[in-house]
Amino acid sequence: MGVTIKQIAEMAGVHRSTVDKVLHHREGVSDSVRLRIQKIIDECNYQANPIGKALKMQDKEIQIGIILLQVDALPYIKEGIEKELKQYRSFQIKLECHEIAYSDVDGQARILHSYRNQKKDGIIIMPLNAEEILYEINCCDQEGIPVVTVNTDIKHSLRLCFIGQDGYKAGKIAGRLMGEFINSTGKLAIFTSDIDVWQSFAFENRETGFRKVINESFPKISILPSIITGESHLIMYREVKKLLEEQTDIKGIFITCGGVKEAGEAIKESGGKNIKLICYENYPEILKLLKEEIVTVTLDSKIVEQGIQSVNVLLEYLIYDTKPYRRHYYSDTVVMVKESLL
C-alpha cells in the first residue's frame, strides 16, 4: 500500500497542508522545508490518488474562464471546447466565456484580472502577446490558477502549457513549398496581422520561419515588406487588390493570418489565377478556393482538435491532478493541395 500525505507530513515533521503545498507547487514553504518534503516524496515514490480526487471533484463546481479572440479560428476553437466538455458530463462545470476583438489588450487584461478575483479553477485563453497579459497569467500561476494557452502563445509566461501549431516550423514548410512552386525566383508578398510582435506571436513565428527558408534556400526570390491587415477582412481585400494593381509581376502571396477568403476574392477579380497563394487552415471557404486553384497550398493545424485538447489538459489537471508531460503540445501540420480533396 502506498504512503499517504499524512504519513509524509509525519516523516517530515510538518502539517499536511505544507505537504499539499509542495505537491501542488504553491507558495508559503521555505526552500529547505520544500527540499526535505520533496526528498521524502521521491524516496517513497508517492502517487496521488486520482480516483479519490475525481470523486471529490464531482461534488464541487469547477469554474472555468475562457477568453477567445474574434478571429477566423474562433468558431472552430469553440467547437472543440464544446465537444470535449461533453466528455465531462458527470462533473459540475461552469463556464464563463468572453470573446474580444483582436488586439484589444486592455480588454483581455481586464477579463483575466476579473477571473483572478473570482478565483477561477482554471483558464483557457487565446492570448495577445502583450506585457499586460503576461503579468496577469503569471499572477494566476502564483495564485494557483492554471492557464492553458490555445492556438496562440505568449512569451515567457508561466502558463500550464500551450496547445497549437508550431508556427516557426509551419512557416518553414510554407517557405519550402513557395520556393519550389515559383521556381526559385520572382517576387513575393507576405500578409500578416500586424508588425507588433507582442500581439502576433503565432503569425510572427510563421513569417520568421518562411523568411528564413526563402532567404537561405532561394536567394533569387525577392520578398516585399510585410503587409499589415490587423485581422480585418476589409483591409485584406483592399490590400490584395492594391498589391496586384501595383505589382503586376508578383508571383506568390503568403498569408500568415485570417482573411484568406477576401484575398481569394481580390485575386479572382484581378484575374491573377497564376499567382501561388499559400495560407493556413481547412476552413470551408479556403477549401473552396483550393478547389478553384486560387489557393495553391493550405497548411491545416487541426484547430478543432486544439480546442478539444485545451479542455482535456486543463480538466485532467484539475480533476485527476495529471500534469501535462510537456509545455508545448504542437498540433499536426497537414499540407493540403487540390488533390487532397478528391
Image (spheres, helix red, strand yellow):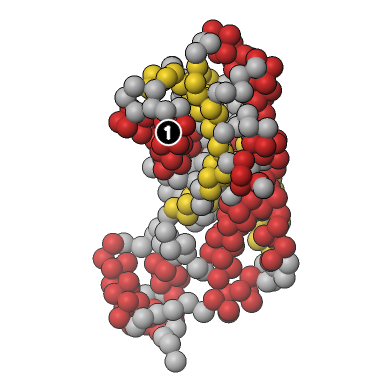
Q: Is residue 52 left or right of residue 61?
A: left
- Depth check, front residue: 195 or 39: 195
At horizontal 55% and vertical 37% (from top left) the residue drawn is 297
- Depth check, front residue: 136 or 187: 187
Answer with the quarter of the image where residue 25 lies.
bottom left
Number of labels in the image equals 1
Q: Where's residue 266, x and y in %?
A: 66, 19
Q: Is residue 93 left or right of residue 157?
A: right
At horizontal 64% and vertical 50% (from top left) the residue drawn is 304
Q: Where's residue 72, x and y in %?
A: 65, 35
Furthest residue toward top: 246
Q: Where's residue 44, x and y in %?
A: 34, 83
Q: Is residue 125 left or right of residue 175?
A: right
Residue 104 visible? The answer is no
Furthest residue toward bottom: 1
At horizontal 66% and vertical 53% (from top left) the residue drawn is 81
At horizontal 57% and vertical 54% (from top left) the residue drawn is 310
The type of residue carrying mark 1 is: Glu
Crowding near pointer 1: few (<14 within 10 Å), some, many (20+)?
Answer: few
**Compared to 142, does 214 lie above or below?**
above
Answer with the quarter of the image where residue 4 lies.
bottom left
Furthest residue toward left: 32
- Depth check, front residue: 60 or 128: 128
In the picture, which quadrant includes the N terminus?
Answer: bottom left
Q: Is residue 25 left or right of residue 110?
A: left
Residue 58 visible? The answer is yes
- Depth check, front residue: 62 or 229: 229
Is label 1 in a helix, a strand or a loop?
A: helix
Which residue lies under the disc numbered 1? Answer: 180
